[in-house]
Image (cartoon, rainbow, N blue to C red):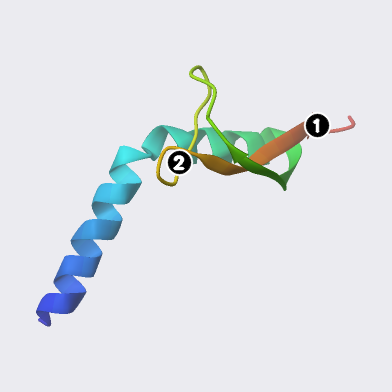
Amino acid sequence: MDPVSLIIGITMNLYTLNNIDFFHQRANNNNTMTCHWRYVGKQKPMKDTKKITLFGNIYYRQICKERAK
């Protein structure tokens, strides 16, 4: 097995595990609501929301609306 592939795989797994709450919330939102991503510029994240940060900032936010029944 190539060591570079191993390092990249471990890094991606650690990234996913550190942000698992975000991915879980996003999946739930997509199943129950109509969602899209909006660019919000460089902002500091709110403390009570599930988020993925890049160097402590967020750039996109998921906007969701209830589906019509």
The mark tally for this picture is 2
**Residue 6 image position (x, y, % from top left):** 15, 70
Disc 2/disc 1 C-alpha distance (Å):
23 Å
Q: Which residue is mark 2?
A: 53
Q: Earlier in the sequence, mark 2 or mark 1?
A: 2
**Residue 20 image position (x, y, % from top left):** 38, 38
Assign the C terminus to one quadrant of the image: top right
Q: Is residue 27 above or below residue 14?
A: above
**Residue 22 image position (x, y, % from top left):** 47, 36
**In the drawing, does residue 35 fall left or right of residue 42?**
right
Which residue corresponds to the image point at 51% horizontal and 17% vertical from the top-left? 48
Q: Residue furthest bottom?
A: 2
Residue nearest the observer in this picture, 23 or 37: 37
Q: Is residue 43 above or below residue 12?
A: above
Q: Which mark is residue 8?
A: none
**Residue 42 image position (x, y, % from top left):** 60, 42
**What amino acid type is highlighted by mark number 1?**
Lys
**In the drawing, does residue 56 fall left or right of residue 66?**
left
Which residue corresponds to the image point at 26% horizontal and 54% vertical from the top-left? 13
Write down the quadrant of residue 41 in the picture: top right
Q: Which mark is residue 65?
A: 1
Which residue corresponds to the image point at 56% horizontal and 39% vertical from the top-left? 26
Q: Is residue 11 above or below residue 33?
A: below
**What amino acid type is highlighted by mark number 2?**
Thr
Assign the N terminus to one quadrant of the image: bottom left
Q: Secondary structure at mark 1?
A: strand
Crowding at dot 2, Cα within 10 Å, few <14 / some 14-19 / many 20+, comes out as some
